[in-house]
Structure formats: structure tokens, C-alpha cells
Image (cartoon, grey):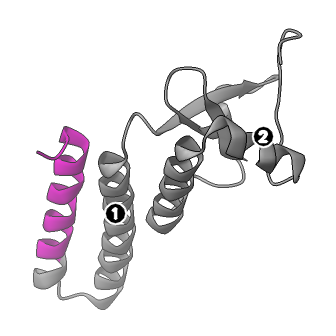
């Protein structure tokens, strides 16, 4: 069952499509068509997020000095919510609003692949510089 956010976005697209169908003034049609394209892209992103496995990918807001969380960064991590956490992607909100549905799908595939790796495989990837291990609080 779609989330309420997906349902709201679907209704918005339906309303815009209906307005576009009856609008006669060209400049308003252009404006409505632009809004409809944006709403459809937003809907695609919501659908992709809704299909994401919550056990594989987590999107976190990170506060940056002087900007708080809303003006900060977004970090996508892959996790089994146990001992394995992988930084997958990060971006500042001032640089981009979100990841696209295509990017999200690729990031989800990366997350799933990382979580399937054994300890031996992870060590090999770290030694081969394909992955970098980050430690905190003096723990390795």
C-alpha cells in the first residue's frame, strides 16, 4: 500500500493533469505543464524511496556548522543496523535537493551488495583500496 506522501503526490499529479486538459490559455498551459513535470519527478522519487528496503539504506540529515539540519547535508548509508555501516553517498542541500529515482535505485543496489560481503571480502576490498575503513573512538 502506498504511503500517504505517495498518495498525495499522485493526487497532485492528477489535479495538474486535469487542469492542463481544460486550460485554454497557452502561457498557463506552459506553467501547468512545468508544474506537472516537476510533480511527476517528485512522485517518481517518492515511489523509489518507498520501495527502498529500510534495512539496507538510511538517509540522514547532518547539521553543518551555522546551518542546522535543514541547510546542512544529506548522507546515505547502507546498514544491517548491527555492526555494519557503509557511507554510500553524501551531498549538501544547497548543491542539490535530492537524489533522482535512477540514482536511488543504483545506491540501493550498492547498499545491498556491500551488505552481502563477508568479513574476508571486506578486508580484501579495504586492502585493495576499493573501500576505506573509518574508525571512531579509537576502535578498529
* Location of residue 64 (image quadrant): top right
Residue 15 sits inside the magenta stretch? yes
Query: Residue sitting at 36 percent across and 42 percent down?
Result: 53
Where is residue 59? Give x, y as percent: 53, 36
The magenta segment: 1-19
In the image, residue 58 lies at what x, y percent? 50, 35
The image quadrant where one finds the N terminus is top left
Q: Could you tell me which residue is drawn at 21 percent across and 65 percent down?
A: 13
- Viewer-nearest residue: 90 or 134: 134
Disc sitting over residue 44 in the figure: 1
Sequence-wise, the earlier of marks 2 and 1 is: 1
User: Is residue 97 in view from this perspective?
Assistant: yes
Picture mark count: 2
How would you rate the neighbour count of disc 1 (Cα within 10 Å): few for under 14, some for 14-19, many for 20 or more?
A: some
Please give left or right for residue 123 compared with residue 53 in the image: right
58 vs 121, left or right, is left
Secondary structure found at label 1? helix
Residue nearest the viewer, comparing 23 with 42: 42
Q: Residue at x 52, y 63 (%)?
A: 106
* Image quadrant containing the C terminus: top right
Dominant SS in magenta: helix
Q: Residue furthest top?
A: 137
Q: Identify the residue under disc 2.
A: 123
Percent from the top left, x then y, of residue 38? 39, 67
Kindly identify the residue that appears in the image at 18 percent across and 39 percent down.
Answer: 4
Please state which of residues 72 and 80 is positioned toward the viewer in this rendering. 80
Say what secondary structure mark 2 lies in: helix
Marks 2 and 1 close (CB-CB < 8 Å): no
Amino acid at each position: 500500500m502506498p504511503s500517504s506522501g505517495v498518495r498525495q503526490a499522485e493526487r497532485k499529479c492528477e489535479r495538474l493533469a486535469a487542469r492542463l486538459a481544460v486550460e485554454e490559455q497557452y502561457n498557463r498551459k506552459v506553467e501547468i505543464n512545468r508544474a506537472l513535470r516537476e510533480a511527476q519527478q517528485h512522485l517518481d522519487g517518492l515511489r523509489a524511496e518507498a520501495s527502498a528496503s529500510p534495512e539496507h539504506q538510511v538517509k540522514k540529515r547532518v547539521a553543518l556548522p551555522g546551518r542546522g539540519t535543514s541547510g546542512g547535508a544529506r548522507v546515505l548509508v547502507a546498514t544491517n543496523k548491527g555492526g555494519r555501516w557503509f557511507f554510500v553517498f553524501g551531498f549538501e542541500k544547497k548543491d542539490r535537493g535530492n537524489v533522482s529515482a535512477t540514482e536511488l535505485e543504483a545506491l540501493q543496489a550498492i547498499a545491498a551488495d556491500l551488505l552481502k560481503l563477508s568479513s574476508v571480502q571486506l578486508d580484501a576490498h579495504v586492502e585493495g583500496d576499493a573501500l576505506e575503513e573509518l574508525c571512531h573512538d579509537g576502535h578498529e
